[in-house]
Amino acid sequence: MEELLRLKNLSVEYKVKDGYLSAAKDVNLTLHRGEVLAVVGESGCGKSTIAHSIMRLLPDRNERISGQIIFKGIDLTTLTEKQMEKIRGKEIGMIFQNPLDSLNPVYRSGHQVMEAIELDGKSRQQAWSESVQLYKDVRMPDPEKQMQRFPHELSGGMRQRVMIAMMLSRHPELMIADEPTTALDVTIEAQIMDVLTGLKAEYGTAMLLITHNFGIVAEVADRIAVMYAGQIVEQGTVYEIFDTPVHPYTRLLMRALPRQPKADGRLETIKGSVPRLTNIGQGCRFANRCPLAQAICEREDPPEIRLPGEHTYCCHCGEEALAWRNRSSKSTA
Amino acid sequence: MAEPVIEIHGLKKYFKIPCGFLGLQTQWVHAIDGIDMAVNKGEIVGLVGESGSGKTTLARVILNLTTATGGFVRLNGNDISRLNQRQTRKMRSEVAVVFQDPAGNLHPHHTVGQSIMRPMIIHGVPRQEAYERALQALDLVKMDRMYMNAFPAQLSGGQQQRIAIARALVLNPKIMILDEPTSALDISVQAQVLNLLLDLQEEMHLTYLIITHDLNVINYACDRVAVMYLGKLVEYGETAAVLRAPVHPYTKGLMAASPLLDPHRRHKNPDRLSGDPGSLIHIGPGCRFAPRCPQATDRCRTESPTLRETESGHYAGCFFPEDTGVTK
């Protein structure tokens, strides 16, 4: 598969009052055309930071970025702001968690979609008919009527459809969806995810899905990158991560998911809490909570270990983690 | 054996909203429209439904935070609308509640100790004893005693939720109503809080009513499940039975929409529910689910179905249990 986006040693630090907070560290990711890559992790793990740094949406006086963001062979970090404007929306589209924050309350929903289309130099007439078609593509009921309505008159699911239509209007090759359904009800969430995966099938749009919802990930992702405290700890196909996780964090997390009735045993919990990420040095960031931690884990960054397939993980206790996985999967089987 | 501690009969709760010119006309929001159910002692019942289905309103009526428009709620056999002040106070000590937003649950200017002691002070427990019991409550929710003097802002979401649970427990309640207790929490923290709740329930023989929109949480934690749609109960029964063989088309749609946390069991060609729940104000005579229902008939649009027992202990409010029942 052809490579579309590659993050190389991307690190992002935010200036805080007592130094720098390392929100993402040495992140390496590859996204291929037509693929859904899910970046999952708990709050504060840096997943949104990654999405925002790709689009260069971070407030720039406060952060330090190093590493490369290579999109279709071009390093986005070297572009000027002017050049970046051509990428944003046109090449890479983005939808956010709360559509009401992203829509202008005083313009009709259709007007906002048409505005995006007119950016490409199309006439008003053409923009109108394209918008109607887009509303149909995102399965908006009664498109022409909804185009005349203001954002507050639409339901949450419809607002997110407007955002998707707006993003879609410029045919981006990559869409970044940052928690696209968190504010929605389950049945509406399913409808929106159907629309998004339909786009992938129809237009071959690749998707970088940022979420903490493992259910959605299991449902739509091709590959998964698991983040913890700013680092990617494990990557692989959705089956590799769900069936045979290796990194102790992923492993524990998978067993914390409520997948069986309580009669079949209690959920796994992870002791301790995420370390402070301000002025943090070398070392595995999961070490303080890890059941396998050794002295070296606190001192040195863990190496990346490749397994057969597309599976990689970052851990000092390579062999041991594998053995531990095999042992515990037998005991649960 | 089955001893009902919460009994709900024909419960209705309408809210009045002004509308029209100068708000001179009124419309009614039918938040709860005729619910019958019972929760037995020592069981965990899950209440599932989408926003606006009336889950939280139902909890508020049970807690006597708002009065019912019709029907009644009995807690331990007493109709809560007929209690005098002293009895209400006693009832309130027996029914505890934990809300969704852990931060909004706690007074930001009160220390953890003050928050946990407050219900005891109100119920006349001497200060010294209240302090002792607050410390024990912290032990119970597995928090260090040093957090007594911390402020909510210094705690993580999971810790705040533990404090809310500790505060709910100090008056030795018999019933706990948990309104989305884990929806604001991360997976690993959700697991801790769910396990804690289940341990406490076993140790203290509590009865739980858990309100959630997450079928995975229901499947894990609940003995029975009640599914609500636009103010009505559409299905009710043992969790295993309802999730194995749902009868009501809404329950089926909800299950088809809920991700299963397993990539091997992705929904293939799912029967997605189209549309959204719609309004609680303009309600027709028929089944409330009819506009979204794939199998709605003319009868569904003109007549409202009542709950019927489709198998032992499994109820559904649909005209078509025969067609949609346990067919395998």
Image (cartoon, coloured by chain):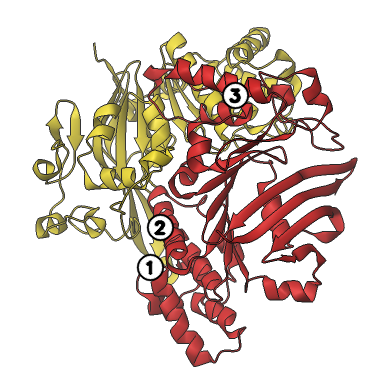
* Residue B275 screen position, x and y as percent: 33, 60
Q: Element under label 1?
A: loop
**Looking at numbered disc 3 in the image, what kind of residue is underneath it?**
Leu
Q: Which residue is mark 1?
A: A139
Visual hue assigned to chain B = yellow
| Chain of the residue displaying label 3 | A
Q: Which residue is mark 3?
A: A322
Does A224 sit above or below residue A159? above
Determine whether label 1 and label 2 are within 8 Å by CB: yes
Determine whether label 2 and label 3 are within 8 Å by CB: no
Q: Element under label 2?
A: helix
Q: Residues within 10 Å of mark 2 (few under 14, many from 20)?
A: some
- Residue A148 visible from this viewpoint: no
Q: Which residue is mark 2?
A: A194
Q: Is residue A94 left or right of residue B212?
A: right
* Residue A37 screen position, x and y as percent: 56, 51
